[in-house]
Amino acid sequence: MNLTRRKFLQSVSMLAASSVLPINSFAFGPDKKLKVVLVGTGVRGTSFWGKRLVENYSDIIEFVGLSDINPGRLEYGKKYIGVNCPTFTNFDKMIIETKPDLVIVTTKDSTHHEFIIKGLEMGCDVLTEKPLTIDEDKCQAIIDAEERSNKKLIVGFNYRWSPYPTKVKELLMKNSIGELRSVDFHWYLNTYHGASYFRRWHGLRNSSGTLWIHKATHHFDLLNWWIDSDPAEVFAYGDLEYYGENGPFRGDKCRTCSHKSECKFYWDITESKRDMDLYVNNENYDGYIRDNCLFRKEINIYDKMSAQVKYKNNITLNYSLTTYSPYEGWRVAFNGTEGRIEGWLDIPYHKGVTIDQAEMHAKEMEQTSETEKIFEPIILHKLWKNHEVINVPFEKEGHGGGDKRLHDKIFVNPDKVDPYNRAAGIRDGAMSILIGIAARKSIESNEPIKIAELTDLQPRAKRI
């Protein structure tokens, strides 16, 4: 790669805006690297938005600062990423002293808005991990801040970039099943990955907004992109019936629990050097326990969720999320006036194989450049005709190959026209979380919730 900083900054404008606006002027030369800071040094920040960028894009990127409230985790993150930049426990001080071009936000979900808004107001473009934020008030504050700042915000949605969802999008764009009328989408989290959300800070709604926000925002973004319309109304059900206070017993944390031998969810964090170095060795700074009990009574998020979503173009969505499935995977079906598209990933019965669920999740999160090439089917079944099997090349690593393609779009091919319009900006980030926010409100009120009543954003029949 022989990229200039100017080319990257142009990509920020192209990627982030719902309408393309002129980029802001920076004083730089053609050979000067992009100055980047990262706030939040957890797993996602240090790996995907840290180490991966240093290893693959160091000719355009220069990390000039790292920030976290946990000084121990911060120093470990610096070594793991492989940079020699200053570290800060004060975000404002970092921005003032390093004067970055781009702020990458990978903190706890409930604090995303704080760093997004500060970054924009202090003159930086911002790239945030999903979800954008966890409630409608914070969402509106982010929208207002971006409008005031004349800076741009990118939301790091990676699933759009995987070849499998992209092929589904291509079939829909070609009207392969006529006019789309309804969609069924069901996601299954297993008792390894799904359970982990209840051990972590994600199990508290004031931190994660519930899995309607933290996890389902991925799914709703895919669906909004596939359907090519904005959500208009949501009715939902949800409950906590398996984890939390429903457990047969509970302990302080897995390491010291007296129920290790009888608890099927016992997780030995000491077997993971990465988790020990990043979390356990730095518990004394902020008290965060990574191997917390998933049956602790303070857990207050849902572990089963279902929703009906009506889109502005009158398409309806049937959605569900399960958090204690024996396997992890998903199914989707699109019903049109001329046929049906069906897709699924990681359903073991379809292949007649037994899959280690922990190993499968580790491979999905892996950021190696070595990819295992396999093929996954999509079924196209037109009315009154035999079905057609479309085999799609699929990569297990990095969220089905989406991670690498997202990075390449931002840093390698920012000017390349994308026929699938996969880049996500603030409106995409907002519309994906607003479905989850509306679902949460619907459960609490037992009423349908209109998206237009949550923020100033008005749903459109055609996405922009």
Image (spheres, grey):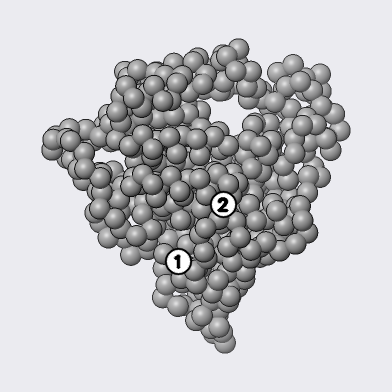
Q: Nearer the viewer, residue 356 or 258?
A: 258
Q: Position of residue 29 (x, y in %)?
A: 13, 35
Q: What type is the residue that disc 2 sits on?
A: Ile
Give above or below for 379 relative to 445.
below
Report x, y in % for residue 162: 43, 53
Please state if 209 lies on the left or on the right of 365 as rendered.
right
State the mark number for residue 463: 1
In this rendered view, identify the residue nearer to me: 299 or 426: 426
Q: Is residue 54 left or right of residue 292?
A: left
Q: Residue furthest bottom?
A: 384
Q: Residue at x 69, y 51 (%)?
A: 440
- Classify residue 56 as left or right of residue 161: left
The C terminus - image quarter: bottom left
Circle 2 packing at 10 Å, graded few (<14), some (14-19), many (20+), is many
Q: Position of residue 203 (x, y in %)?
A: 69, 36
Q: Callout 1 environment at 10 Å: few (<14), some (14 to 19), or many (20+)? A: some
Disc 1 marks which amino acid?
Answer: Arg
Q: Is residue 133 above or below residue 180?
A: above
Residue drawn at (64%, 43%), measured in percent from left and top?
209
Report which quarter residue 93 is drawn in: top left
- Residue linked to disc 2: 433
Q: Which mark is residue 402?
A: none
Looking at the rendered structure, the secondary structure element under dot 2 is: helix
The residue furthest right is 248
Q: Which quadrant, please, contains the N terminus?
A: top left
Foreground residue among 39 and 374: 39
Q: Is residue 73 above or below residue 34?
A: above
